[in-house]
Image: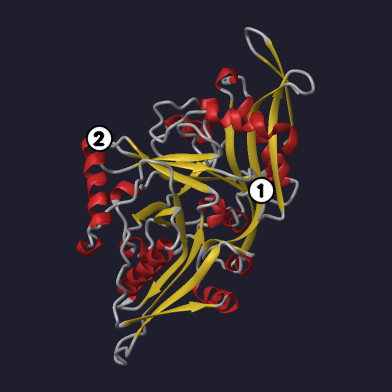
Amino acid sequence: MCEENNKNTMAIRVREFDMERDLPAVEDLERRCQVGLSGDQAEPEAASTVDADDDGGAKKRRKKKAKKQGMSLYVEQIGDPFARVRHSPDYVILVAEHGDDGGEVVGVIKACVRTVSRGKKKQFAKVACLLGLRVSPSHRRLGIATELVQRAEAWCEARGAAHATMATTASNSASLALFTGRFGYAPFRRPVFLGHPVHRHRARVPSAHRVLQLPPQLAAAAYAALLSPAEFVPADLPALLDHKLTLGTYLAVERGPDPSLPPSFALLSVWDATRSLRLRVGGAKPLLRASLAAARALDRHAPWLRVPSLPDVFRPFGTYLLYGIRMSGPEGPALLRSLCRQAHNVARNNPACAVVAADLGPDDPAAAAVPHWPSFSCDEDVWCVKKLGSTAHSTGNAAADDDDWTTLPPAEFLFVDPREF
């Protein structure tokens, strides 16, 4: 496959990623792709799929703009380059190579096909997920991103995917323009990211609340009853709940509930992302940095004061992700806050974890109950979707068009798989 440029002829070859041959080149490429959430550095050919490139480092996801004084939350992928797609039965990494066989790697994209729920119809569907699109800064505007996306879409469609999803950020105008214009995707869902720092001191769970840890099989049965209607619940949810990085599924109920009121409960699972993610807060003023450092010093020397000091979030740190968050009943929000305190206490046992975070649908009532700090949260993410293949356009048949996920309203609950964060 060759692409023509006005100034020269570029020989570009797209092939599958080879770990031994390509890993150093791909890591170097990702270090050179510097696109922030705000879009001020964005290049159309470098805009990403489920990732918007950030400020440097390996396997980057995106830079999240904090809601306070221009601070930003940087999220960096580390470790296995296949980590975010390996759980799918079908996955691939494609690289674009410039020159003859063994030439320079100038682009990369990840893709997988997974089976997830579609929401109100209680149906499951095969969906393509395109991740981590990168194009070398010196080879942009040559159609490389377009070729990578088209090849990834074709690969996924051949494996039964009817729709493809990608994600970007609302303020990354170049990325949005690329997806909705050239690639034909439509904005679809807007999850919110909510983060809370992990303090040195144990969070108190009210004595009126009882927290139980469910074994994986019982947790799967509970979710089967509670996650309907819901979107993007993976068909392999039992495997996710039994994964070694799922540290537990917790249920909170009241002790001695009032029998005259509807029963209340809250449910969530905790995923250890410290091995695959590194976060860092950037853009803080020196005075803020100094004051937080002073609070940490005071807390170390006088722990009995229980100063709510922050960990050093201006250096890379790890996170635990909360997923499968559900609540019900008049005491549901209070019970959910107790579960978040329980997750905080679990995170305290891991020195690498400095933040507990969750991705939720913007209309999910749980979003208002999850404790979070604006400096560790954002509402910039935009999921985009596209119907693949020859049926991508309206058929005029109501039943057929109703099968088009792009036109369906959001379900009550949006499931964000922590393996793909």
Residue 198 picture location, percent across and down: 35, 57
Coloration of the structure image:
secondary structure
| Labels 1 and 2: the sequence-earlier one | 1
**Residue 259 is drawn in which quadrant?**
bottom left
Asked whether, in this view, residue 14 is left or right of residue 357, the answer is: right
Residue 112: which numbered mark, if any?
A: 1
Q: Secondary structure at mark 2?
A: loop
| Residue extending farthest bottom | 259
In this view, 184 is above or below 333: above
In this view, 57 is above or below 139: below
Q: Quadrant of the N terminus?
A: top right
**Residue 204 is drawn in which quadrant?**
bottom left
Residue 285 picture location, percent across and down: 25, 35
Residue drawn at x 32%, y 88% is 257
Please tell me which residue lies in front, 369 or 352: 352
Please tell me which residue lies in front, 55 or 157: 55
Residue 134 picture location, percent across and down: 58, 31
Instruction: Tell me which amino acid carries mark 2.
Output: Lys
Instruction: Tell me which amino acid carries mark 1.
Output: Cys
Residue drawn at x 58%, y 24% is 136
Please indicate, yes or no, whether residue 18 appears anywhere in the rendered image. Answer: no
Residue drawn at x 54%, y 75% is 219
Q: Secondary structure at mark 1?
A: strand
Circle 2 residue: 285
